[in-house]
Image (tube, grey):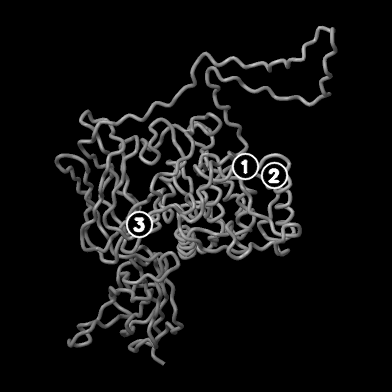
Amino acid sequence: MAALFGRRMRRGAASTAVAAAAMAALSASGAPSAVGEQPAASAAERPSAGASGQEEPSVTGDSPYHTDLPPLKGPGRNDPPDETPATGSAESGIPATVLDAYRKAEASLAASNPRCRVPWELLAAIGKVESGHARGGRLDTNGTTPSPILGPVLNGVGFANISDTDGGAYDGDTLHDRAVGPMQFIPQTWESWGRDGNGDGRRDPNNIYDAALAAGSYLCAHDRDLTVERDLHQAILGYNRSQEYLRTVLHWYDYYRKGAHEVPDGSQPAPGAPTGNGGKTPSPAPVRPGTPSPSPTKPGKPTKPAKPGDGSSSKPTPPPTTPPPTTPPPTTPPPTTPAPATRLVDLGDGALSAPAGERFAERPAVRAERADKKPAAQAKVRFTLTGETGTTFEGGATTVTVTTKADGVAKAPALLAGGKPGALTVKATLLGTTEPVTLGLRGEVTAPRADKLVRTDETELTCEAGATFEGRIALTATRDGQAAPGVAATATVLAGADPADGEKAADQGPYFLTPGDEPAEDRRTRELTLTTDAKGNLLLPELHTDDTTGTFRLRVETTGGAVVVLELKVTDPA
């Protein structure tokens, strides 16, 4: 978590008093998120260990964050005693675009993950300590920062040691990673959790809409309910594993819940550098050659004046100096410009395929290579969808541009299948070359499916031979708990009550009549194909019987494997 702005950490007795007063005020308020010493996230909630056996970094690599606390209200401050932020106060003001991004992220997650119940005030609290709300709302018209907000180099000097994972695509550093953007994601975390919050077809950590939605999605991981205190605390600790960070975010969260208001973008001063870093102590800055280091003054008795003739001098003794280092401090070499890419290689294992209305399991992926067939980092690859299926990338776009990582790989966002089955093509084009290099990745949208089928009528399934069953059989198909429209289903009359009797259509017993002008005997069928309506409902035609008595089965199966088997009884005439 490292932004390059924010006020400095309070120091000395004054900061201790303010922090203690803030904790007391929150405890007295009875708020669910009142600050207290909480256990660190459990092993199940923390990121899993990698192949090396070491724990993977948090969202931000435990980078620095802003440690300022919100102002307190109460006696002695000439403020209202209810501890509520004064309307229009500077500290409760949030830049208009940033506030809009927090609220839109809350609304989006309420629709896609209603269990989580992430509040925009929590996103605001994290955005405050991470970047001072994108440097006080210094954004362009699309919500993107004019220049990247970068944390310190995560080279193990005072912070986590994270080698480069993105080829410098996000942070401009090809040796180590750095936290990026208003919500301070390190590149490898952004690769997993990055979202398109403004619908422009891109996932940009420097865009406040994308970053706010990504932060909310991460907080909701592990099926969390953020109205539950333990889930709330574990979510925040996953962002930065520091109890001080947890307390700071909770202070701002409670503060914004009591009142916040919109202010114009860029109207607030940009904060200074962040200072909190999860309790880790960064290495001291190197002393420049020739610059003496000040010696600390130790408390003690005052020095007595010198007496005449005792050999003492009235001149003060100069403080000792620390010799300058003989070896200059190490410097990080500037990133080198890689050789350009000249070709693309398809990394897919076959045709892309998904049922209509569902997400493709595989994301289109290619590798950009140089002339020597080595991976090309930071190459631009444009993915374009063609076809009549209505398929889009996640976020609704049909064209997106992706920058390759250190391994030369570019992955397009997830594909969302449209409602019309058919073929499609994903064209991957390497940009920046003298002659366009394009790959065509073929895909298909298959018929929609259902994973559950239930009977919804109460028709008696007993009938006399030579008659018609009373009423019609009704069923409803669903997928993931939602109505499944346009799903194909087959209804088949089977002989016998036991599956051992076979799954082929019976040649006697109950039957349906197909539409037409032919005689009824010519329109008899014991196997029908139907399609669910817009609400996922199936209404079977009337069932008739011939002169054969006994027990039969009616099997109804949808695309996707949802099955219902009903027992039909045909009795002798009364």
Q: Earlier in the sequence, mark 2 or mark 1?
A: 1
At label 1, which amino acid type do we have? Met
Residue located 47% across and 22% down the image: 330
Q: Is residue 402 left or right of residue 251?
A: left
The residue nearer to you, when weighing 543 against 236, is: 236
Query: Looking at the picture, how far across and down is residue 395, in whole percent?
Result: 35, 59
At label 2, which amino acid type do we have? Ser
Residue wearing tag 3: 394
The part of the image, by quadrant, that contains residue 373 is: top left
Callout 2–callout 1 Cβ contact below 8 Å = yes
- Check the image and report above or below for 346 versus 477: above
Q: Is residue 560 left or right of residue 89?
A: left
Q: Is residue 18 left or right of residue 192?
A: right
Nearer the camera: disc 3 or disc 2: 2
The residue nearer to you, when weighing 355 against 264, is: 264
The part of the image, by quadrant, that contains residue 166 is: top left
Q: Residues within 10 Å of mark 3 (few under 14, many from 20)?
A: some
Residue wearing tag 1: 9
Mark 3–mark 1 Cα distance, whole angstroms, equals 40 Å
Residue located 52% across and 13% down the image: 326
Query: Looking at the picture, how far across and down is residue 157, in whole percent?
Result: 53, 29
Q: Earlier in the sequence, mark 3 or mark 2?
A: 2
Q: Residues within 10 Å of mark 2 (few under 14, many from 20)?
A: some
Query: Looking at the picture, how far across and down is residue 167, in whole percent?
Result: 36, 35
Query: Looking at the picture, how far across and down is residue 136, in whole percent?
Result: 49, 52
Nearer the camera: disc 3 or disc 1: 1
Q: Which mark is residue 15?
A: 2
